[in-house]
Image (cartoon, grey):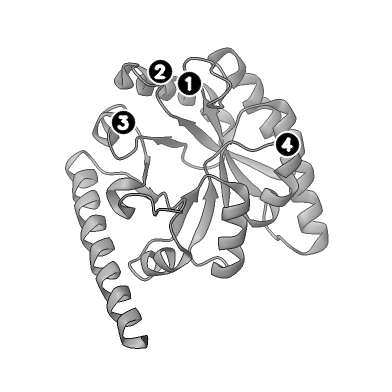
Amino acid sequence: MEQNMDERSQRRSEELAEALRKVRHRIAVAGGADLLPVTKFHPVEDIALLAGMGIGAVGENREQEARNKAQVLAGRPEIHMIGQIQTKKANSVARWAAAVHTVDSLKLVHALDRGVALAQERGDRHENLPVLIQFSADGDPSRGGAVEEEIDALADAIASTEHLELRGLMTVPPIASDAGVVFARGRILLERIADRVLGAPVYSAGMSHDLEIALAEGSTLVRVGTDIMGPRPVI
């Protein structure tokens, strides 16, 4: 039984290594960017294998799943929250998230700021929380994100907090939209708030199917799930 498990782990390691090589090649050919593998629904063992391949951070969408994985991984690799966050979950996210890509309301800004303060007070966290503003090109509340007219106020609000650090902007083009147009618009919005960003502005844009388009429009970080992890496991 143990030998079978070792064989399965070895096969999975080889699968991930080859998929990671192909995605990194695509990114390099398209101009280069940082890579955030998206590991939702995949086991923590897969994430540990990625860490052994030089991956320092992964993205997760669901708070409970991410929290459970964070407890096991203990920061190797880090976990970024790339899914929508209910304000009632902000305290939990503030304890385990290395970064949040989906800030989209003033209410969430204040909830995360309070959550980080509480986590630091309890000793669960020592550093401030890097965050990105999520830009919504269509304003669909089911997908999250702030519309263009709200971006500037959110940047001001984050910059004025004590425990959050504005690092950039994230976007996902709506289905059936022109991805290039959306990515280009997001890049312009990021440039508008760059004076409130700490460090080099991060533009989190592009996934498995459209990363080349995103990189052509200035993305600095692509989030890739299926093309690295394969199909979601049957649960």
Going by the numbered disc 2, the residue's amino acid type is Arg
Look at mark 2 in the image and give the residue it sits on.
185
Alpha carbon separation for disc pair 4 and 3? 29 Å
Alpha carbon separation for disc pair 2 and 4? 27 Å
The quarter holding residue 123 reads bottom right
Look at mark 3 in the image and give the residue it sits on.
214
Alpha carbon separation for disc pair 2 and 1? 6 Å
Q: Looking at the image, is mark 2 or mark 3 earlier in the sequence?
A: 2
CA neighbours of label 2 inside 10 A, class few (<14), some (14 to 19), many (20+): some
Look at mark 4 in the image and give the residue it sits on.
87
Q: Looking at the image, is mark 2 or mark 4 earlier in the sequence?
A: 4
Foreground: 199 or 152? 152
Q: Residue furthest bottom?
A: 2
Q: Position of residue 166 (x, y in %)?
A: 59, 37
- Name the disc covering residue 163, or none: none
Look at mark 1 in the image and give the residue it sits on.
189
37 relative position to 132: left or right: left
Q: Secondary structure at mark 2?
A: helix
- The answer to the question of whether label 2 and label 1 lie on touching residues, with beta carbons closer than 8 A, is yes
CA neighbours of label 4 inside 10 A, class few (<14), some (14 to 19), many (20+): some
